[in-house]
Image (tube, grey):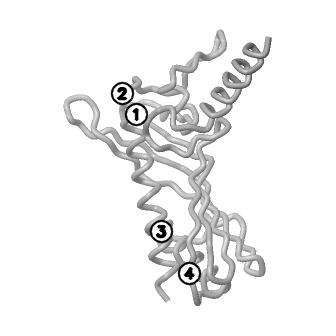
Amino acid sequence: MRNLIIMATILFANIAYAQNKDTVGLKLPFTNGKVVYQKTFKVPGKSRSLLFTNAREWFEKRYNNLDSVNVQDASNGRLTGSGWDVLSFKGPLHMDVTSRVGKTIEINSANDIYSINISDIIIGYQEEPELPRTYFTAEDLVNHVLGKKYPRGTLNPVPFNKKLSKKALVSLNKLVADLINSVNQNLLAK
């Protein structure tokens, strides 16, 4: 009986750990069924107001306007907005596969520190110019790679096979890393 309890405890711990570990081998921030990129930077000597102003300028430069900003809370150093970028990776016959990627970007500033959260990632893929765009989430893409079964009567929204889906996730990681680097360079500019 004691061995059974120990085995059950080990099994439960392994299941709980597996939900947070990188199951697709791509170092994705996939926890509790959500893809959320988070990064915090220490920036000694930078005030909350300077970091907030620089973050706002970054949004304006990156997306050519401030219409993409949904929340501007200067007193708390919080800026939240959305934007669309292009995701590209090599597909069959080494042809470029491109999609549009929308996401929510939240930048929280304080004295000497700021954080970036990128979430609610939506990918829009258009196979042919005359066809409508197919939209799916980063979570759909991860679940497709993991082999998740969809309920009866529900179609898998991801138009890629597993190999292309992995390539899309690798490209998404690079896109987000470049985005975070761009924010970091702008916030440290002054």
**Could you give the CA–CA distance between mark 2 and mark 4, rounded to whole angstroms?**
39 Å
Residue 67 visible? The answer is no
- Image quarter of residue 40: bottom right
Q: Mark 2 — residue?
A: 163
| Amino acid on which the number 3 mark rests in the picture | Arg
| Amino acid on which the number 4 mark rests in the picture | Val
Point out the tag, 2 or 4, that comes first from the N-terminus: 4
Circles 2, 4 touching at the beta carbon (< 8 Å): no
Circles 2, 1 touching at the beta carbon (< 8 Å): yes
| Amino acid on which the number 1 mark rests in the picture | Lys
Q: Mark 3 — residue?
A: 62
Point out the tag, 1 or 3, that comes first from the N-terminus: 3
Q: Is residue 127 left or right of residue 120?
A: left
Q: Residue 36 placed where, x, y %? A: 60, 49
Name the element at disc 1. Answer: helix
**Could you give the CA–CA distance between mark 2 and mark 3, rounded to whole angstroms?**
31 Å
Circles 3, 4 touching at the beta carbon (< 8 Å): no
**Could you give the CA–CA distance between mark 3 and mark 4, rounded to whole angstroms?**
22 Å
Q: Is residue 157 above or below residue 99?
A: above
Residue visible at 67% across and 70% down in the picture: 108
Residue visible at 52% across and 33% down in the picture: 142
Q: Is residue 149 left or right of residue 108?
A: left
Q: Residue 39 placed where, x, y %? A: 56, 62
Q: Which mark is residue 166?
A: 1
Q: Which mark is residue 43?
A: 4
Within 10 angstroms of label 2, few (less than 14), some, or many (20 or more) residues?
Answer: few
